[in-house]
Amino acid sequence: MAYHHQKLSRREVEKIFYNLCAAISQINDPKEGAEFLRDILSYQEAEMIAKRLKIAELLLKNNTYEEIRVLLKVSHMTIARVQEWLKMSGGGYRKIISRAKFKEEPRQKDVSMNAWKSIKKIYPAYFWPEILLEEIIKSARKRDKERLQRVVGEMEAMKEKGDLYKKLKRIFSNNIRRR
C-alpha cells in the first residue's frame, strides 16, 4: 500500500522548530556548533545559510552588490533577498553579526605563495588541473615547452582571456624563474 505524505500543521512545525532553536542555544563553542550543523544540514544547505549570513554582514558593512556577488559567487537576486530580509526585520541577522567574532578571510593578494602551495598540498583534489599542468610543463622536453608557450602566446592575442590562460601564464612564468 502506498504511503501518502502528509504535511505537519503549522503548530507542529513551530513546536519542532522551537526544539531545534533550544538545541542550538545549548551549543557553547563553534566547533561543537559546526559538528551539529554538519550532522543536520547537507553541504548545499550549510553553504546557502553561511552565504546568507556573510551577505548580511557585508551589506551591513555597506559593501556593494557587485562586490558581494564577486566575493561570494552569488546572484544579485540572492543578495536582494537578504537585503529585503534586513529591511523587513533582520533582527536575528543584526544580533548574530554584532555578537559573533567572525574570522576575516585573507584577501587573495595577502596570501603568500608559500601559504598557497601548502593549501595545494593539503587539498590536491581541488587543484588537480593546475598541479597536472605544472607537472606536464616541468617534465616536458624543450620542444614541447616551446609548443605550449606558442599556445599561450596565441591565447594572449585573444581579447578575453580565460582562467586557463591566466593559470598557464603564471605556471610558465614560475617555471622560467626557477631555471
Image (cartoon, rainbow, N blue to C red):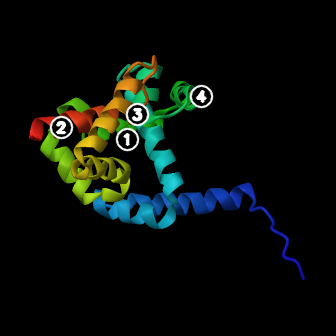
Label 4 or label 3, whichever lies nearer to me, is 3
Identify the secondary structure beneath mark 4: helix
Report the residue at 37% width, 50% height from top: 129
Q: Nearer the viewer, mark 4 or mark 2?
A: 2
Instruction: Say which residue label 3 marks.
Output: 163
Q: Give the crowd class for mark 4: few <14, some 14-19, many >=20 residues within 10 Å.
A: few
Q: Amino acid at mark 2?
A: Asn
Residue 18 point in image, percent of width and height: 55, 58
The percent coordinates of residue 68 (x first, y second) are: 43, 27
User: Toward the viewer: 70 or 164?
Assistant: 164
Residue visible at 38% across and 32% down?
151
Q: What element does badge 1 sit on?
A: helix
Image quarter for residue 9? Answer: bottom right
Residue identifier under label 4: 77
Please report whichever mark, 1 or 4, sits nearer to the chain's N-terminal start. Answer: 4
- Sequence order check, earlier mark of 4 and 3: 4
Q: Earlier in the sequence, mark 4 or mark 2?
A: 4
Q: Mark 1 touching mark 2, by CB under 8 A?
A: no
Residue 96 numbered tag: 1
